[in-house]
Image (cartoon, coloured by chain):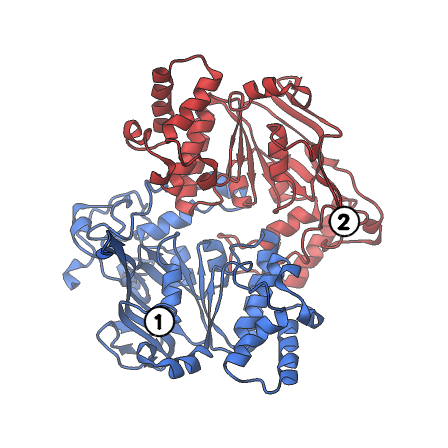
Amino acid sequence: MTEAPNGRTEAAGATSSASSGEYLLETRGLKMHFPIKAGVLKRTVGHVKAVDGVDLQVRQGETLGLVGESGCGKSTLARLILRLLEPTAGEVVFEGENILGYDRKRMLRVRRDMQIIFQDPYASLNPRMTVGNIIAEPLKTHDIGGSSGERKRRVQELLEIVGLNPEHYNRYPHEFSGGQRQRIGVARAVALNPKLIICDEPVSALDVSIQAQVVNLLQDLQKEFGLTYVFIAHDLSVVKHISDRVAVMYLGKIAEISDRKGLYAEPRHPYTNALLSAIPVPDPEKERARRRVVLAGDVPSPANPPSGCNFHTRCPRVREYCKEHVPPLIPQEKNGGAEAGESPDHRASCFFPVLEGQRIDERAESTPYRVSER
Amino acid sequence: MAMLEVNDLKTHFKTQDGTVKAVDGVSFSLEPGETLGIVGESGSGKSVTALSLMQLNPKPPVEYPEGEILFEGQDLLKASESRMQKIRGNDIAMIFQDPMTSLNPVFTVGDQITEAIRIHQQVSKGEAKKRAVQVLKDVGIANPERRVDEYPHQYSGGMRQRAMIAMGLSCNPKVLIADEPTTALDVTIQAQILELMVDLQEKYGTAIVMITHDLGVVAQLADKVMVMYAGRAVEQGPTDDVFYDPMMPYTWSLLRSIPRLDTAGEVRLLPIKGTPPSLIFLPEGCNFNPRCPFVKDECHRIDPALEGKKPGHAAACILSPEELENKKHRVDEELGVEG
């Protein structure tokens, strides 16, 4: 059972396909298992479980941050939502309808409303097309914007919206700097007035002084056009800056999800704790005072994920129980102990969450956290 | 005498379009066990500075018209190539940014580490290999006896960077130059590598030059900081002074333009307008004036030199500390930021 923010309780999960009006986007039990082929006959010898059962809800007008280390499945998830990849299992529900069954024609209509901004502003713009044509292409594909003259005016308007000179309409991508190119990518994404934009590491490739320009632009556009963002990044500081809610992914699964404040102030999952403590803060005194939790080892291979809780190989709180049981993503206690109650919006998949006042490397003494519920 | 002292180093590239002053008058000194953080954007001259210390820039097109690099009193710019080969890897070692491309894929990791050891020390192959196993163990690689015979592709990204560090440390260098050693790594692996570097520094008293664009990494590790912009040091001083009281508008702007984990989401970011200048066509006057939030008329004429603003803290800006303080305050008021 998932409780909605306004207090209503409603059925959700992989089995239900009831539409829910308040979410713009929902994924239910979404899985992407890439086959590993080997030998002359190219037989499937295993699967890379890039995305392994993800339930996400994105509300109209909000920014959902999606963080995790490389290889955790963030970008695959983005591609699944846009149906650039066909998932192995699960549903992608956009505006209350599962779009996975849609044929080409209906899909084309939906794609108007969902766009993507890619990470690499050098690779995502065709070097042989002028900027004008790049931005006009979605308009042509969807046959909107009227005559070519009207389209040109629309493109120039878009260039102005993203802070570029409209007279640079006829220039080629190589004539622009990295930050400017990313603005072109943004203009292309907003050209069709979409409802949802998936930003896949939109500022990671940019210099620090340029990142802020693009982040501010995205925030301004969201306010102006009421956009909904799924903001994917590995940088938790940027995600904290821009997101209303944040989901942390580990090995294809959601480790923790909460509103921004809850996740950063009261991280419950040991992985979230470790991630947060690993990020250096540009403040020498705070840095000297910090206690860092350094995780041992690397992220395991998604082709052969650990049994039980997939984080158990690196977890400082690991107990025998974790190696055999898969923790569900369940609501977490608010700070203030059991009296303060649970926050339905703050969920983590851990049997021994880091509760108020605890340190991550302190092993929880209690029995597995509310295991009886399972 | 400092272990490493760089005075007015200039590294220029002669190109058809003109001279690129990649490093244009940089000075700093480093004591044993000390860490200097060099911060700047891409193209600001950080990496060229590092390569100059090792004398690894291709000559031509590179020229060193002025300056000296004194390592234990000896000027490396005047040292012969054979002398440099003795110093490189032995006294001064370097860790490169990209562990994927800096290891040779056709040799085992062990081969590459023993090569470094055997060049500098008269030891047998067996002895060198034993030492390679030891350094791999020092940098926290599990099963070093087995791993030493593996190829780089069998290592993960974090392990490759550890192997690079192992190679750098195999001869116990006095100075370690780390050029963005963690930029390509995930944060949890970055934390492992930085912790490792600090441990090794405490153990061996190595002086570290840490080149990065991540101000957080500098705040965590560095004793002193040098901020570079367009080939020049624009601010230099003890880490705390530079972070808490930046005297150059560029440093201040950088600190205000990045989202920070401790305050993110509470204040709007203050982007630095425009882009870094071309090193061939530098702006008139101060290099930073087209992007500076506090620019005055004089900034277009006067090219400020790096000058002491407070003891040990220098910045290249014509604004007096009081003027700067007022201007910072005004921006904060406009943005509605407290403090």
B60 or B178: nearer the viewer = B60
Residue under circle 2?
B281
Where residue B146 sits in the image (x, y, percent)?
Answer: 28, 30
Residue under circle 1?
A57
- Quarter containing the N terminus of chain A: bottom left
Q: Quadrant of residue A258?
A: bottom left
In the image, taking residue A279 as reference, residue B306 lies left or right, namely: right
A107 or A333: nearer the viewer = A107
- Quarter containing the C terminus of chain A: bottom left
A307 or A294: nearer the viewer = A307
Contact? badges 1 and 2 (CB < 8 Å)? no
Question: Who's the residue at 64% across and 72% down the image?
Answer: A159
Residue B241 makes an appearance in the image: no
Q: Quadrant of residue B273?
A: bottom right
In the image, taking residue B49 as reference, residue A77 lies left or right, namely: left
Where residue A114 sits in the image (x, y, percent)?
Answer: 45, 75
The span from disc 1 to disc 2 (Cα, nearest Å) is 50 Å
Task: Please tell me how crowded label 2 is: few (under 14), some (14-19), or many (20+) other residues with Cα within 10 Å.
Answer: few
Where residue B101 sits in the image (x, y, percent)?
Answer: 47, 40
Question: Who's the residue at 62% across and 23% down the image?
Answer: B4
Name the kind of residue labelled 1 in the image.
Gln
Chain B rendering hue? red
Instruction: Tell which chain the image draws in blue.
Output: A
Q: Residue furthest bottom?
A: A146
In the image, taking residue B233 as reference, residue A40 lies left or right, namely: left
Mark number, residue A148: none
Residue A285 makes an appearance in the image: yes
- Mark 1 chain: A
Q: Residue furthest front?
A: A40
A192 above or below B117? below
Name the kind of residue labelled 2 in the image.
Phe
